[in-house]
Amino acid sequence: MVSAFALLGDIVRPKSFAGIFGAAPSIALATLTLTLHSEGARYAATEARSMIIGAVSFMIYASLCSRIMWRSSLVVWLAVSLPLWWLRKTSPWRR
């Protein structure tokens, strides 16, 4: 699994985003391995489920934020560009 994520990290552009794929799975697997050896299988299973829930929640959050930011930035762009377009059109200094 770590190798698959490392390969995905090499493929994804930009490289600053690709680092997520290289580091997160390795850290998660190392944490689960240490937890398994120190706390046992039942505790490690709980930790694994928590990691999955956290990953799915973050993916939904990131998707929602991306959508909201795109829409709000479109509104801001229109709020700025339309008055400027109107001012340019009605300007007495227009050529």
Image (spheres, grey):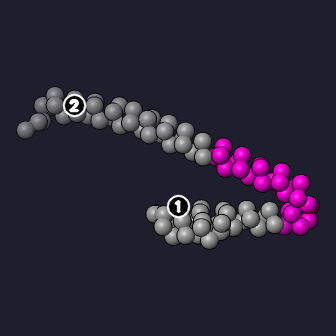
Residue located at (77% from left, 67% from top):
30
3D distance between C-alphas at marks 2 and 1:
41 Å
Asked if the residues shown at circle 2 and circle 1 are in contact, with their CB atoms under 8 angstroms apart, the answer is no
Magenta span of residues:
34-58
Per the image, is 51 magenta? yes
Number of numbered labels in the structure image: 2
Q: Which mark is residue 17?
A: 1
Prevailing secondary structure of the magenta residues: helix
Residue 40 lies, in percent from the top left, at 91, 60
Residue 46 lies, in percent from the top left, at 83, 51
Residue 7, located in which quarter of the rendered image?
bottom right
Nearer the observer, 82 or 13: 13
Residue 42 lies, in percent from the top left, at 89, 54
Q: Which mark is residue 87?
A: 2
Which quadrant: the N terminus? bottom right
- From the viewer's perspective, is the residue at label 2 or at label 1 nearer? 1
Q: Secondary structure at mark 1?
A: helix
Per the image, is 42 magenta? yes
Please say whether residue 58 is visible from this viewpoint: yes
Say few, some or many: other residues with alpha carbon within 10 Å of mark 2 (under 14 / 14 to 19 / 20 or more).
few
Residue 70 lies, in percent from the top left, at 44, 40
Please say whether residue 76 is visible from this viewpoint: no
Given the image, on which type of amino acid does mark 1 rest?
Phe
Nearer the observer, 67 or 9: 9
Residue located at (86% from left, 62% from top):
35
Q: Earlier in the sequence, mark 2 or mark 1?
A: 1
Given the image, on which type of amino acid does mark 2 rest?
Leu
Nearer the observer, 61 or 3: 3
Residue 60, located in which quarter of the rendered image?
top right
Q: Secondary structure at mark 2?
A: helix
User: Farthest residue in the right direction?
Assistant: 39
